[in-house]
Image (cartoon, grey):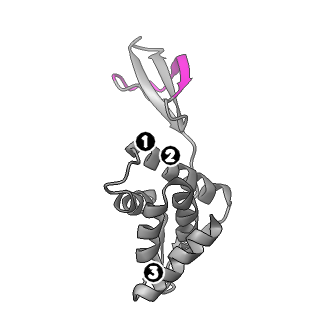
Amino acid sequence: MKCRFCPCTESRVIDSRPTDDGSSIRRRRECISCGKRFTTYEKIEELPIMVIKKDGRREPFDSEKILTGVRRACEKRPISAAEQDILVQNIVRDVFNSLEQEIPSTTIGELVMQRLKELDEVAYVRFASVYRQFRDINTFMHELELLLRDK
């Protein structure tokens, strides 16, 4: 690891610990040459996952899009931002654990709806109305009937 303060490429690790979210490792290093200390972060290299859109286009997976949709669905509901973040983290984990390099957007949408249904039924119906593109009140009522039947 190249020192930030001099051209030396030799350093020794003084301390290693995982970051708070556990996604990377923080290392304190000391330069062999100048003796100054600096911090580096080691992160797992992830293969990019491509999302196959309904029209066949492919784009890189972006968890921020999921978070935006969940935030909109949960607006003015008694669901904390932390709960929403955990929901999205669980969905992202499921997507990466699938070990697929390409995943249909419909699969992601269904995962979101499944998690929202468990968390808050109103948020679920809001998300479903946009995701499933409810065209009229009958489609909306059908989804509500399914929700009531599942209870």
Residue at image point 46% right, 88% down: 138
Q: Residue at x 47, y 19 (%)?
A: 28
- The three-letter code of the residue at mark 2 reads Ile
> Cβ–Cβ below 8 Å for labels 2 and 1?
yes
Residue 102 in magenta stretch: no
Q: Identify the element where label 1 is drawn.
A: helix
User: Could you tell me how many numbered marks the image carries?
Assistant: 3
Which of the two residues, 62 or 107, is positioned nearer the viewer here? Answer: 107
Figure quadrant of the C terminus: bottom right
Residue visible at 50% across and 35% down?
21
Q: Nearer the viewer, mark 1 or mark 3?
A: 3
Residue visible at 46% across and 57% down?
63
Residue 103 x %, y %: 60, 70
Q: Which residues are magenta?
A: 5-18
Task: Mark yes or no: residue 59 visible.
Answer: yes
Q: Is residue 94 left or right of residue 10?
A: right
Determine which residue is flagged by label 3: 140
Residue marked by disc 1: 82
